[in-house]
């Protein structure tokens, strides 16, 4: 394997874990790289580009409006700023003006996660409702006040049947005229999520460009309400102010557009078949060998409708040691630890052709 990382003495990783930011998100296909390369070749009016790319993205995803951010987390920050600015037009002229303005963002306690720091970075105060046991509609109704600027919904592993449903949240928010923002950063596939959340009534939905969309790693996609996205546009780079440190380049804008065009045209049925085949390949290569129990697991770590392989290890072989040995070996291989029990989880979405075999081979070697 040759790559430009070699010149730094850095060994690339075969990723059978997930579209993790710390490993580089995802791999950009040819179409995306070409679009970025072409974009890099000429100057352009960046405001005009963001506007036109946004119009095209909105059309493609059946949304009113769209904006390219430099990642889903920056989308969370910009969306929050837009919601706060609905109440206080000059909120971001200087930070002292944020004192005392409506800034409360309601979130279910069960949805709290490390990404909501980005919401707070816009100057918002998180108001938790419910408990780790669940949330009731009364909890939400009690929390809404004139200081409420938005209700955030995080979609993913944090979702639980005891939480307040998105449908109930949207209904209650509509009554109080409070926007609902959905963080769906890792919620592709299914491709229909590009319009599902907003068609259900969410005001904005935010995706990572660098996960399954396979766009530039430093890109994000905000879709939904024209009014909120126009506000976001006013705060985003190259304008100065709250969004300026989260610059989006012409290459990211054109790369993300190419990625979304490609994603919409993918044969998702046949991709799923490929994933099922990889999962079955790992199961047949591992199950019953060296004390291993291998089986299909569904859905995956982000709750996506995609299978993965669960590899139950013998008790005397701790999962941490296997993960460590795979990472230190040649080539480096990344797999996930199970949430419960002594098992590994193999993800078929992030390996490319020929790599499932290497993952299997390395696992069998490490297990002796
Ligand atoms: C990955 C992720 C993010 C951050 O996305 P970036 O594009 O890396 O900024 C935010 N929220 C959730 C739930 C995620 O999974």
Image (tube, helix red, strand yellow):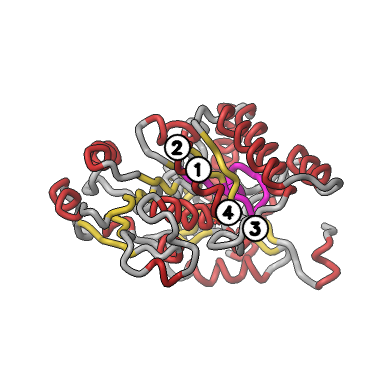
Say which residue label 3 marks: 247
Cβ of mark 3 under 8 A from ligand 1: no
Magenta-drawn segment:
205-220
Q: Which residue is drawn at 45% across and 39% down?
A: 227
Q: Which of marks 4 and 1 is nearer the N terminus?
A: 1
Mainly helix, strand or loop, the magenta region?
loop
Which of the labelled discs sits on residue 225, or is there none? 2
Q: Do the residues labelled 1 and 3 touch (CB within 8 Å)?
A: no
User: From mark 2 to mark 3, how far is it between C-alphas?
Assistant: 22 Å
Q: Which residue is drawn at 66% across and 35% down?
A: 52
Residue 331 at what x, y percent from top left?
Answer: 72, 62
Q: Residues within 10 Å of mark 1 (few under 14, many from 20)?
A: many
Q: Is mark 4 on a helix, strand or loop?
A: loop
Residue 176 at what x, y percent from top left?
Answer: 23, 42
Say which residue label 1 marks: 229
Q: In which quarter of the image is residue 255?
A: top right
Residue 170 at what x, y percent from top left?
Answer: 28, 39
Locate residue 341 relative to residue 259 in the image: left or right: left
Q: In which quarter of the image is residue 200?
A: top left
Q: In front: 23, or 46?
A: 46
Mark 4 or mark 3: which is in front?
4
User: From mark 1 to mark 2, how far is it between C-alphas?
Assistant: 6 Å
Q: What element carries label 3?
A: loop
Q: Residues within 10 Å of mark 3 (few under 14, many from 20)?
A: some
Q: Residue at x 40, y 45 (%)?
A: 182
Q: Is mark 2 on a helix, strand or loop?
A: loop
């Amino acid at each position: 394997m040759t790559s430009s990382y070699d010149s730094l003495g850095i060994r690339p990783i075969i990723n059978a874990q997930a579209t993790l930011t710390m490993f580089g998100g995802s791999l950009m296909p040819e179409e995306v790289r070409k679009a970025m390369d072409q974009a890099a070749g000429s100057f352009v009016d960046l405001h005009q580009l963001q506007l036109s790319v946004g119009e095209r993205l909105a059309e493609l995803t059946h949304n009113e409006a769209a904006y390219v951010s430099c990642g889903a987390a920056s989308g969370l920050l910009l969306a929050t700023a837009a919601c706060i600015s609905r109440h206080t037009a000059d909120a971001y002229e200087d930070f002292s003006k944020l004192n005392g303005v409506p800034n409360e963002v309601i979130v279910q306690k069960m949805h709290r996660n490390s990404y909501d720091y980005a919401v707070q970075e816009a100057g918002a105060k998180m108001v938790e409702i419910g408990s780790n046991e669940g949330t009731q509609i009364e909890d939400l109704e009690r929390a809404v006040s004139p200081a409420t600027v938005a209700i955030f919904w995080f979609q993913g592993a944090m979702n639980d049947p005891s939480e307040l449903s998105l449908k109930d949240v949207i209904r209650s928010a509509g009554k109080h005229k409070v926007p609902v923002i959905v963080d769906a950063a890792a919620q592709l596939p299914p491709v229909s999520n590009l319009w599902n959340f907003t068609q259900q009534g969410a005001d904005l939905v935010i995706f990572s460009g660098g996960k399954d969309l396979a766009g530039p790693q430093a890109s994000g996609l905000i879709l939904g309400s024209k009014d909120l996205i126009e506000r976001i546009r006013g705060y985003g780079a190259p304008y100065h102010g709250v969004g300026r440190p989260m610059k989006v380049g012409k290459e990211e804008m054109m790369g993300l557009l190419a990625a979304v065009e490609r994603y919409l045209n993918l044969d998702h049925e046949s991709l799923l078949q490929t994933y099922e085949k990889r999962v079955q390949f790992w199961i047949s290569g591992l199950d019953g060998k060296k004390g291993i129990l291998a089986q299909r697991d569904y859905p995956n770590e982000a709750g996506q409708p995609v299978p993965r392989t669960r590899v139950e290890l013998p008790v005397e072989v701790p999962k941490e040691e296997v993960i460590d040995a795979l990472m230190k070996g040649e080539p480096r291989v990344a797999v996930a630890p199970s949430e419960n029990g002594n098992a590994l989880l193999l993800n078929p979405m992030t390996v490319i052709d020929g790599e499932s075999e290497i993952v299997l081979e390395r696992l069998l070697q490490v297990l002796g």
